[in-house]
Image (tube, rainbow, N blue to C red):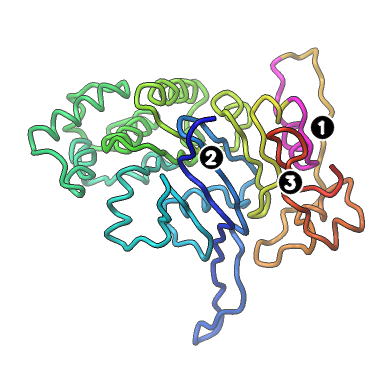
Amino acid sequence: MSEVLLEVKNLKKHFPIRKGFIRRTAGYVRAVDGIDLTVYAGETLGVVGESGCGKSTMGRSLLRLVEPTSGQIHFQGKDIMKLSKSQMRDMRREMQIVFQDPYASLNPRYTIGQTLSEPMEIHHLHNSTARKQRVQSMLERVGLDPSYSSRFPHEFSGGQRQRIGIARALVLNPKLMILDEPVAALDVSVQSQVINLLEDLQQDFNLTYIFVAHDLSVVKHISNRILVMYLGRMMELASSNDLFADPLHPYTRALLSAVPIPNPRVKRERIILQGDLPSPANPPKGCVFHTRCPLAQDVCREKVPEWREAKHNHMVACHLV
């Protein structure tokens, strides 16, 4: 087993709902509601679930880009929840993020060279000549011409902009990268190019990925393990092969039934979930999935299922397993 790079215990992020003239707190949106997770060095952990399940919020909470409500986050043995702002800024050299929208994440007034140099300036790395060389080498490494450093973001396609975002995250040589739906806004043909680039970079730079995505086929291709989330909670966690071969949670089965099979002669039974995703401001009692689960029983409506190991290295939160 590889060394533990990141360990998360009971991570929660609740956003206050404020109402009235005095903006009193009337409740909370439970975006992330109790995450226990271990990420090993060199692996790719895929995180999947419907929109609004808390995937992106969890990723940003791990870097404290949004401040967690409670919980523990240990990175390389250090509890980053106890770090000051200046200490956390130093720690972020080791932890970087690639955002979903490759245009909104780039400053339109900065050239690409300025965008990639800025992280090194913030962390006081290298002199100006060395920074320029580093920028050019990183652009070349992600498949772009080094001369592009003098251009602005609007002069690039979506796929090129995402490569720039990846280069910016890599320029500090981090150990952990949060990939927040990095290919969701790209054409299918460009998606495969970016995924292949990420796999090559992982090998070359010894990176660890947390890969947040909707597309289960992409997640299966790139991930060692996959975490399934629903309404801020963990539903199932297993290796990529185990999860696709033998999904245990009813929600996971419903998600996998929607994955297209590239063979018109092979048909899969489609599991259609009834109803809409409940509000994270008022989650159901017991198992949060019971309002849409076709197998729900009385115990599901009354008791929160225990997060446990149903099979070897296959975790699940379900009373029926």
Q: Secondary structure at mark 1?
A: loop
**First to last magenta residue range:** 245-262
Q: Residues within 10 Å of mark 1 (few under 14, many from 20)?
A: few
Determine whether 208 is above or below 94 in the image: above
Looking at numbered disc 3 in the image, what kind of residue is underneath it? Arg
Q: Which residue is mark 3?
A: 308
Q: Which residue is mark 1?
A: 270
Residue placed furthest toward the bottom: 22
Q: Residues within 10 Å of mark 3 (few under 14, many from 20)?
A: some
Give the residue drawn at x 75%, y 25%: 245
Residue 316 falls within the magenta-colored stretch: no
Q: Which residue is mark 2?
A: 212
Q: Are marks 2 and 1 in contact (CB under 8 Å)?
A: no
Image quarter of residue 142 = top left
- Nearer to us: label 3 or label 1: 3
Looking at numbered disc 1 in the image, what kind of residue is underneath it? Arg
Residue 59: which disc? Answer: none
Q: State the separation of the CA atoms marked 2 and 3.
A: 23 Å
Looking at numbered disc 2 in the image, what kind of residue is underneath it? Val
